[in-house]
C-alpha cells in the first residue's frame, strides 16, 4: 500500500486541508499567493466575488470558537457561498459513530465543503476519509493536533512584514504542549525554509522530544529572544490544563509573559504575533499587545483572505 | 501562417484611441497581455490618470471545470470607477467571456459612466454579444488555435500561434 498524504489526491492535488505537516512548499506558497489577491478584494467597497456561488459550506463546530468560526463564515460569504453554521455541543459520551452520522446527514443535504473544529485530534481526518471524493474538508482545529489555516495566516503575516522566510529567526513562546497552532506553525515554518525556529517554554509546557520537529528549545526568555525577528505568542490554555503544569498565572507572567522589557531582548524590528484570544497579563502585557510591534489585528484581517484562498483552491480541485 | 507584427498593430491601436480622444478616459489592462499593452498605451497616450489592472480569475465562468490553477494576480484599480470613462484593454478578443468577467469585476468597484474595449487582435468566434471599439487588426483563425501575445526581454511585443491541445 502506498502511504500517501491523505490531503492530496494521486496527482498530488490538494483535496482537503487537514494539517500543514507533509504539505510541499509549492502548495503552501500557492495558498499564500492566492490569499494576496484576495486581500485586494477585501479592501474594496464591494467585498464579494462570485467564485463559489451555489456551493454549500457547512461550519461544523464541535468545540466553541468565535473568531475562527466568524472568519470562516465571512470568507465563505465573500466568495458567495451559502454558509450553514452548526455549533454542536458534544457530550463526553459522543463517539465517532455519531460524528460520521452527522456528516452523512449533511452530505445528503448536498454539502460541498465541511469546516471542522473538534476537541479530538484526528476528527477532520476521519471525516475526510469518510466523505465522497467531491466533498472537501478543512480542519479548523482538532484537539492538540493541528490548526492549518491559523498557521497559514501566520505565514502570510510573516511574509507581509518580513518578505522572505530564508533569513529569519522565529520564536514560538508559551504553551507548546497543548497547542495545535504551534505544531502547525512549526511544520509550515520549516517547510517554507525558516532556518531557525525556537520554542521558549517551561519544561512542563513542552511536549516530549519536541526537538524532533526541528526546533531549538529554550527555557529562558533572555537567551531565547536574542536576535529574534518574529515572536509568535501562544495562549495559556487554562481549559486544557490538567493537574499542576504551572504554579500560577502570575508566576508564568513573571518568567514568560511578554513585557516591553523582554521585547527589547529581540531585534528592534521584530514583530509580535498572537493567534488569539489573548490573556492579557498572563502571556502578554497590554503595552506589547497594543504596541507598535504588534501585528495581532492584521493577523485577523489576513485570516479572512487566507481562508478565502484555501476554500477556493479546494473547491476548484475536483476529485 | 504569417502573423502580423505586434509592434505595428500596437501603433495602429494607439493611433485609433488617440484620434478618438478628447474624453477624459482611464485605462484598465487585463492580465497578462492586456496589462503590457495598457502600460505601453499609458506612456504613449500620456494619460494623467493612473493605470488600472484586472485579473479576472475570480469572475471566470469556467471555475467549476478548471479551478484556480494558474497564478492569480491582484487587481489594482487606483481611481474612482464611479462615473469614469474606462477603456478596457486586452490582447486578443475571441469568445468574449474574459471581457464579460472583466465588466462584472469593474462593476464591483462602482458604476462607470462608460466602458469601451480596445484589443490588439479581434479573431472572431464570439460566444457573447461583445464588440470592440478599437482594434489593431481583425484576424480569422481556426478554433483549435490559440493566439497569444508575448513580451521579450527588451519589452518588444510579438504574437504567437499554437495548437490548443498542446501545453504552452
Image: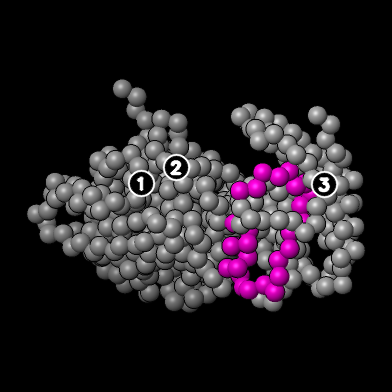
- Region rendered in magenta: B101-127
User: What residue would you read off at disc 3?
Assistant: B137
Which mark is first along the chain, 1 or 2? 1
Q: Residue B113 in magenta?
A: yes
**Viewer can see residue A314:** yes
Q: Is residue B168 above or below residue A247?
A: above
Disc 2 versus disc 1: distance between alpha carbons?
Answer: 9 Å
Tag 2 and tag 1, C-beta contact below 8 Å:
yes
Specify the subunit that label 2 lies on.
Answer: A
Same chain shared by disc 3 and disc 1: no
Residue A136 is labelled as 1
Tag 3 and tag 2, C-beta contact below 8 Å:
no
Comparing labels 3 and 1, the label whose residue is closer to the camera:
3
Disc 3 versus disc 2: distance between alpha carbons?
Answer: 38 Å
Disc 3 versus disc 1: distance between alpha carbons?
Answer: 46 Å
Q: Residue at x 75, y 47 (%)?
A: B122
At label 2, counting other C-alpha atoms closer than 10 Å, the crowd grade (few under 14, some 14-19, many 20 or more) is many
User: What residue would you read off at disc 2?
Assistant: A317
Side of A79 relative to B113 (left or right):
left
Which residue is farthest top?
A: A1
At label 3, counting other C-alpha atoms closer than 10 Å, the crowd grade (few under 14, some 14-19, many 20 or more) is some
Q: Quadrant of the C terminus of chain A?
A: top left
Specify the subunit that label 3 lies on.
Answer: B
SS at mark 1?
Answer: strand
Q: Quadrant of residue A84?
A: bottom left
Amino acid at each position: 500500500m502506498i502511504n500517501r498524504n491523505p490531503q492530496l489526491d494521486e496527482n498530488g492535488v490538494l483535496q482537503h486541508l487537514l494539517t500543514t505537516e507533509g504539505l510541499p512548499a509549492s502548495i503552501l506558497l500557492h495558498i499564500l499567493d492566492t490569499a494576496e489577491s484576495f486581500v485586494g478584494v477585501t479592501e474594496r467597497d464591494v467585498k464579494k466575488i462570485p467564485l463559489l456561488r451555489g456551493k454549500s459550506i457547512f461550519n461544523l463546530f464541535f468545540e466553541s470558537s468565535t473568531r475562527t468560526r466568524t472568519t470562516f463564515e465571512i470568507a465563505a460569504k465573500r466568495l458567495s457561498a451559502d454558509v450553514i453554521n452548526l455549533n454542536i455541543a458534544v457530550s463526553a459520551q459522543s463517539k465517532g459513530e455519531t460524528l460520521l452520522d452527522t456528516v452523512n446527514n449533511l452530505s445528503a443535504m448536498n454539502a460541498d465543503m465541511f469546516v471542522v473544529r473538534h476537541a479530538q485530534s484526528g476528527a477532520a481526518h476521519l471525516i475526510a476519509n469518510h466523505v465522497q471524493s467531491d466533498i472537501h474538508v478543512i480542519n479548523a482545529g482538532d484537539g492538540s493536533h493541528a490548526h492549518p489555516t491559523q498557521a497559514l495566516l501566520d505565514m502570510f503575516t510573516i511574509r507581509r512584514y518580513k518578505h522572505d522566510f530564508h533569513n529569519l529567526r522565529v520564536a514560538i513562546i508559551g504553551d507548546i504542549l497543548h497547542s495545535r497552532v504551534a505544531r502547525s506553525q512549526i511544520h509550515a515554518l520549516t517547510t517554507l525554509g525558516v532556518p531557525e525556529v525556537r520554542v521558549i517554554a517551561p519544561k512542563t509546557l513542552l511536549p516530549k522530544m519536541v526537538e524532533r520537529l526541528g526546533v531549538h528549545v529554550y527555557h529562558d526568555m533572555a537567551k531565547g529572544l536574542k536576535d529574534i525577528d518574529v515572536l509568535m505568542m501562544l495562549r495559556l490554555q487554562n481549559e486544557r490544563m490538567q493537574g499542576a503544569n504551572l504554579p500560577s498565572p502570575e508566576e508564568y507572567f513573571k518568567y514568560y509573559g511578554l513585557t516591553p522589557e523582554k521585547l527589547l531582548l529581540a531585534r528592534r524590528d521584530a514583530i509580535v504575533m498572537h493567534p488569539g484570544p489573548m490573556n492579557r497579563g498572563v502571556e502578554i502585557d497590554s503595552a506589547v499587545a497594543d504596541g507598535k510591534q504588534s501585528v495581532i489585528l492584521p493577523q485577523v484581517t489576513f485570516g479572512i483572505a487566507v481562508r478565502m484562498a484555501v476554500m477556493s483552491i479546494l473547491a476548484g480541485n475536483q476529485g | 501562417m504569417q502573423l502580423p507584427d505586434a509592434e505595428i498593430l500596437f501603433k495602429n491601436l494607439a493611433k485609433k484611441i488617440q484620434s478618438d480622444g478628447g474624453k477624459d478616459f482611464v485605462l484598465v489592462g487585463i492580465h497578462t497581455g492586456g496589462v503590457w499593452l495598457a502600460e505601453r498605451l499609458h506612456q504613449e497616450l500620456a494619460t494623467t490618470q493612473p493605470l488600472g489592472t484586472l485579473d479576472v480569475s475570480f469572475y471566470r465562468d469556467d471555475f467549476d471545470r478548471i479551478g484556480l490553477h494558474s497564478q492569480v494576480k491582484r487587481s489594482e484599480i487606483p481611481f474612482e470607477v464611479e462615473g469614469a470613462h474606462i477603456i478596457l484593454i486586452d490582447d486578443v478578443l475571441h469568445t468574449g467571456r474574459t471581457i464579460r468577467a472583466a465588466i462584472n469585476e469593474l462593476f464591483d468597484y462602482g458604476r462607470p459612466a462608460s466602458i469601451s474595449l480596445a484589443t490588439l487582435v479581434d479573431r472572431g468566434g464570439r460566444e457573447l454579444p461583445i464588440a470592440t471599439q478599437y482594434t489593431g487588426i481583425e484576424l480569422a483563425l481556426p478554433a483549435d488555435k490559440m493566439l497569444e501575445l508575448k513580451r521579450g526581454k527588451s519589452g518588444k511585443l510579438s504574437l504567437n500561434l499554437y495548437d490548443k491541445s498542446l501545453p504552452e
